Amino acid sequence: MKGLSKIGVGLYQGEESDAGDLKLFEVLEFALLNGVHVFDCAPSYRNCRSENVLGRLTQRYPDRDYFISTKGGFVPFDFSQGEEKENAYVQELFDRGWVRPSHFDQEYFQTFDPIFLDQALTTTLATLSRDSVELYYLHNPEYFLAKVGRVRFLEVMKEVLLWIKDKIKAGQIKAFGISSWNGFFEEEQRNRLELLEFYTLAEEVGIQSYFNYLQVPYNFSQTKGLFFKGQQASTSQKSLFGLAEELKISILGSAPLGQGKLPKYAYPEKVQKIFPGMTSAQISLSFVLSTPGISSALIGTTSLVHFKELVSVYLEERFGDRYFIETLTQ
């Protein structure tokens, strides 16, 4: 496979229904047939429906190139069933030995217990009709860090990395990374994910060469990845993007449209002149794709019309260093 396509499809958003599944499949199919092969999912997305839709795609087009990422950290459950069934399911997890109580946080329905992660990955691979995933993320580990503190957090993360090492040896995981929302940008250091600390832990386990990706939000209104110098490097504080570049870790940008807010924003005329003939949504995406360090931007939508509008920025290569530099000077 060549390098990552500059845009990918995130399967987080969309109506949780059969109709929503059909809309999502239309977007995935159009993307795949138009040069996009990055697909980002998780067992819990869209109330446990999204990976099934992606599985339909891989079954229909088994010989295409895919770069599929999945995630471990949250326990998939249909919360519409109510609190009583939720509690019964948690007890079942404990009784069957799938999750150890010491590794479970019911507030966020989160676990990094390797026992559960292993079962979830097996289910994902079966759903996708694949022997492996290109990328496995630890999903929002900052919640767990805030709950248990750094010492316990690193103990459990080492357990997880040892499990990932086994999955790499088995050929089921090709690379791994961290998918986070605010974790790398927390103002309080005690709750902040430290990239170098985690990379050092991966070195101890012997899998740092497979720690290749981060997924964080990045858009016109969320630029901390580039500018917030909160990451401890060897001799100084750096931005997340700066440290990731030093460690040769690629960045995939989530929420490039600010979760649907930026397409409704009327950019000032001086910004519109930098991106001539583009809609607000296209300007937002072009800015992200033009940012140094962004390997791919993940678009989350089940609207085929909306996706076609955005994919044109990628297909027509309407992005680049010039757009980024000119925007920063405004």
Image (cartoon, rainbow, N blue to C red):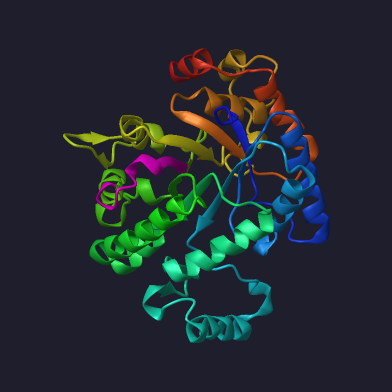
Side (left or right) of 79 relative to 162: right
Report if residue 225 lies within the magenta region.
Answer: no
Question: Can residue 1 be seen in the rendering of this structure?
Answer: yes
Q: Nearer the viewer, residue 261 or 15?
A: 15
| Residue 308 spot, x, y in % from top left | 76, 31
Q: Nearer the viewer, residue 318 or 188?
A: 318
Query: Which picture quadrant has residue 141?
Result: bottom left
Q: Which residue lies at the image location 27% right of the left edge and 43% below the top edge?
A: 196
Side (left or right) of 220 relative to 156: right
| Residue 116 spot, x, y in % from top left | 49, 70
Report if residue 209 lies within the magenta region.
Answer: yes
Up the image or down, 87 lies above or below 80; here it is below
Query: Which picture quadrant has residue 67?
Result: top right
Q: Which residue lies at the image location 47% right of the left edge and 38% below the top edge?
A: 222
Q: What range of the chain is rendered magenta? A: 203-215
| Residue 107 spot, x, y in % from top left | 47, 73
Q: Nearer the viewer, residue 180 or 250?
A: 250
Quarter of the figure with the N terminus: top right
Side (left or right) of 119 relative to 312: left
Side (left or right) of 217 relative to 65: left
Instruction: Farthest residue to the front: give it.
Output: 170
Q: How many numbered tags mark residues here?
A: 0
Up the image or down, 42 lies above or below 243; here it is below
| Residue 173 spot, x, y in % from top left | 49, 50
Q: Which residue lies at the image location 54% right of the left edge and 17% below the top edge?
A: 320
Question: Can residue 44 be seen in the rendering of this structure?
Answer: no
Instruction: Farthest residue to the left: give it.
Output: 235
Up the image or down, 164 lies above or below 255; here it is below
Q: Which residue lies at the image location 40% right of the left edge and 60% below the top edge?
A: 163
Q: Nearer the viewer, residue 310 or 158?
A: 158
Up the image or down, 96 lies above or below 137; here it is below
